[in-house]
Image (tube, helix red, strand yellow):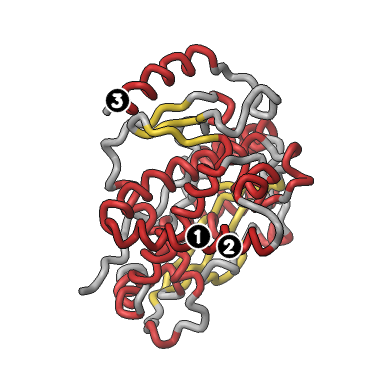
Amino acid sequence: MIQLKRWGCVFLLLKVLFSADSFGEEKWKPEDPFAAIDGQPIFLGELNLVLIERFGVNQFNRIDVRVQQATASLLVRRHLALRSLHDQGGDALTLLVDRQMESLQRELKRRGSDLHQYAKERYSTEKSVRDDLDFKVSWGHFVKSRLTEANLRRFFENRKSHYGGGRWEVSQIFVAADSSDPDQVDSIRHRLSDLVKGIRDASDVGLAFAAAARDHSNSVSAGDGGRLGWVTKEGDLPASVMQVVRNTETGAVSDPVQSPLGMHVVFVHRFEEMPIAFETLSDIAPLRRDATKALLEKLVQSQSQAKVDWFIEALQPPEGSRPSLDSGAVDHEE
């Protein structure tokens, strides 16, 4: 309790001192907290560790601020999930993490190094290395116990249409956009939103969409009124676009949606249901990925009453920027 009160006083001071200055400035140190959950700090050392693990030391100082923000948001969510994992795992989980930490230290010693040097090379701290390992071990153990074939089958049965349980005949309007230029993306989104409004107000939405596609789309399908034909799964279209296709009613036009390629608007001509069974899935990886995301979301949502404070504004993601995950979860079978 004394420690929590001490951190609370420190955080009040940090919120006054930390402004919207760039995270990349040298004044920030690995032992500085960038956020806290109910007064428990999350340190920059852990953020550095994750970024370097993904991009390497050589690229560390050139990482886009939006990537930094997304990673900081992910770490906050990881720590929220970790609170639930600790509650469920108890002393047995703590012992498992301790053993993995000891194993890491033995390996570092064999290489002629130690934990301090390992952390320093990654602009991190020993505590942040421990926190990072804690999540990886706890999460890995949890996922292994939950992603059984029975649970995956149940998850699949609740979301069949996401894995080829139907097909959609669609047209699209596509406008190329540089995702690294948010101003350009916003400008294109606004233009397409106005275009969509006009199409929806037309007496014949299908004809209006085809005309708009011929005039505005950058896709090779523009000459055919944007007609793409039948699609069934991610890969036929970018994942974000395929998700919109699934959620758009027959005869309706979607709102603009962004993909790594640019901005898309889709029109759904027809939908045909196609029976599909778990046993016939040719690739189970997307199912496992989605189930894993749902597990994480369920753990995070279990901490919905927790209070999150941010201390470095440059790392705080814009409001509503985190993509929502499917709220369905893979429940553990006893």
Give above or below for 75 relative to 270.
above
The three-letter code of the residue at mark 2 reads Arg
The three-letter code of the residue at mark 3 reads Ile
Q: Is residue 199 visible?
A: no
Mark 3 = which residue? 2
Query: Residue 49, percent across and down?
Result: 61, 46
Q: Mark 1 packing: few (<14 Cα in 10 Å), some, or many (20+)? A: few
Mark 1 = which residue? 102
| Earlier sequence position, callout 2 versus callout 3 | 3
- Label drawn at residue 111: none
Count every numbered label the image shows and give the total: 3
- Label 1: state its secondary structure: helix
Q: Quadrant of the N terminus?
A: top left
Cα separation between marks 1 and 2: 6 Å
- Label 3: state its secondary structure: helix
Nearest the eye: 268 or 178: 178
- Label drawn at residue 106: 2
Residue at 70 percent of width and 50 percent of height: 55
Q: Mark 3 packing: few (<14 Cα in 10 Å), some, or many (20+)? A: few
